[in-house]
Amino acid sequence: MRGPSFLPGLFFLLSLSEVIIHKTKASCTCPQHAYCVNGTQCTCDHGYVSRSGKEFFTFPLNTCEDIDECKPPINIYCGTNAVCQNVNGGFHCLCNPGYKLLSGDTQFQNSNENTCQKTTSSTTTEGMKNVSRSPAPEPSQLQSVVETFKSFLTNYTTLPGMGEKGEVASWATTVLQDVESEALQIALKFPEQKIQKIHNSIMAIETRVVTDNCSEEQIFSLNTHMNSVDIHCDDIVQENIQGPSAIAFISYSSLGNITNETFFEEANEKEQVYLNSQVVSAAIRSPRNTSLSKSVILSFQQMKMKTSSEKAICVYWKSTGEHSQWSRDGCFLIQANESHTICNCTHLSSFAVLMALTKQEDDPVLAVITYMGLSLSLLCLLLAALTFLLCKAIQNTSTSLHLQLSICLFLAHLLFLTAIDKTKIKVLCAIIAGALHYLYLASFTWMLLEGLHLFLTARNLTVVNYSSVNKFMKKLMFPVGYGVPAIIVAISAASRPHLYGTSNRCWLNLDKGFIWSFLGPVCAIICVNLVIFLLVLWILKKKLSSLNSEVSTIQNIRMLTFKATAQLFILGCTWCLGILQVGPAAHVMAYLFTIINSLQGFFIFLVYCLLSQQVRKWFGEIITPKSESGTYTLSTRFGTDSKPSQVPTLEYGPARWRQESRDLRTKWATSPDPPGIILSLDPFSLY
């Protein structure tokens, strides 16, 4: 049966086959971007550093990583109006948008070679204009436009945020207009070639020429880079223009890197907006932004899958020079799914899709319920903790568990109420999120220990090793209760510290499934405690049914039922309502979850303090002078002609309870006239 144990190691070694490249000199095997030295050890190529930090290494699973010279501590300086760009194994410098080297080169190596000079935007596309005037065949001309613009765009769109915002806006506007103009000119220069398609990794162009009259209902569809536009023929063919008409549809793969969401004119604090499509342009011979008789339909393939909490916004590039920006005027959303967005626009221009993660407004009623419920819970948890700490009569292993659970829940709820929305300082917010992560995980771990102790206590009603429960729990509870949550939080914080804290709440980020570092353990604990609760009920039912039918008649069955139900709240089983907040019932579940779980502290104080006879006696001694102590049993009722009868009491542990139960069963079985005793048996009072 050892075979399966080797599978994980086998899969791991196979996965390395794409990473390890054997560069063998003698018996030396080195990873990618490394070479062998003297046949005995490896060293990384220039521009790379080993993961271990050592210059020479022999461990074959070590890897060489690229050195980013553009960031500290190296932080290459390229001079004014220029920026450093990191590449694999090195770097180079580029002029900012609107600047170029006097030599005409596109890149240089250091500030001493910096000759970046400001240039007019029109010169950047002069090469494409020269292409359109050349006598080359039309496919070659359109291809030349694409290739010329590719090298130009590659240099200027890989560095988001370069240059002043106004300069970038003006540059982008000029580029969009010039490319549209050149594409239309080339299409109309060769009208016999009705459809032309050219594309590369940076951009794609499709043009269509219409030479004949067409019906009003005829629709042309153009596609580039998985984006498309549908336009009516009568919007292309216009009465005031002689000769053939044409439409050009262009997709830019990387232009959105600089014309990003920061140019959205309606950006506000309530929405997190990002560009989620390629920038596309649709143009005819009429001026840009001219209203059409019939609207066009644009279809975009999204670069990132849309989530249910995001909404798509259809926008166009409002060309106003240095003040150009994305605007939604005249563009409307038709439909959006996870992968595509369809827009309706009443004019032609350049278009894109923005995704907005709307900041959800808090439900005022739910907020009031939360604050009132948690405030009551905090008060009850504080009183419960003080009771468990000061009441000597009840201090035992169970009380220690109750005390630690009360402390963890109190601190978690208090931090939640006072600091969950302190998002202005990111570092502080991350610390708060980490503290909440730990405190709530610790609370659930103590709930698990509560459930385990309840099960062991119930099981020991039928066996004679009650003392082993206390010994076991005393050794186990503190290392598990506080150690396990610490390990989980430490691993989470070390692997993805940037996912602690969001823009709206100081809690765990949903990205990359990070929330499961909390939900995973919580769901597991809830399931375990539910199973434990059902097992405890089964054990107690079996034990009670073995008693004399007259004896096992329970006087306070309602109280027993209430205490059993309360254990569901105390053990955290009702937290599963939080996971069920999906679909149409999400709003109702949110209210149920808030109401029920904000009262968890109240149930702890009620069940373990107010309903405890010993605690009530202690409260009475505090309020009134101490009176003569008496002997208490859970509940007795005397027969009309009998003396007071003793019943099994749980105050001295399961062993005493079992012995008294056996003695009474023997006595009542041999008695010709058993006394009219009704046993008030409350198994949860033992716990």
Image (cartoon, rainbow, N blue to C red):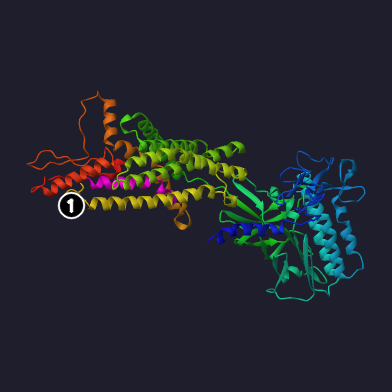
Q: Could you tell whether 128 is left or right of 341 in the image?
A: right
Tell me what residue is drawn at x 30 percent, y 31 percent. 393
Q: Could you tell whether 657 is left or right of 17 in the image?
A: left
Q: In the image, is residue 577 part of the stretch drawn in magenta?
A: yes
Tell me residue 31's x, y (percent).
75, 53
Tell me what residue is drawn at x 91 percent, y 68 percent. 136
Tell me residue 578's x, y (percent).
45, 50
Tell me residue 118's x, y (percent).
87, 45
Question: What residue sits right under mark 1 in the picture?
Answer: 549
Q: Could you tell whether 500 is left or right of 551 in the image?
A: right
Q: Quadrant of residue 352?
A: bottom right
Residue nearer the viewer, 335 or 480 = 480
Kindly report the secondary structure that dominates the magenta region of the rendered protein: helix
Residue nearer the viewer, 224 or 265 = 224
Q: Quadrant of residue 277?
A: bottom right
Tell me residue 78's x, y (percent).
84, 42
Q: Is residue 501 visible?
A: no
- Kindly state the secondary structure of the residue where label 1 is placed: loop
Magenta span covers which residues?
A: 555-578
Q: In the image, is residue 563 part of the stretch drawn in magenta?
A: yes
Q: Quadrant of residue 608?
A: top left
Task: Give the position of the C terminus as an image quadrant.
Answer: top left
Q: Is residue 640 visible?
A: yes
Up/down of 97 relative to 393, above or below: below
Query: Tag count in the figure?
Result: 1
Residue type, label 1? Ser
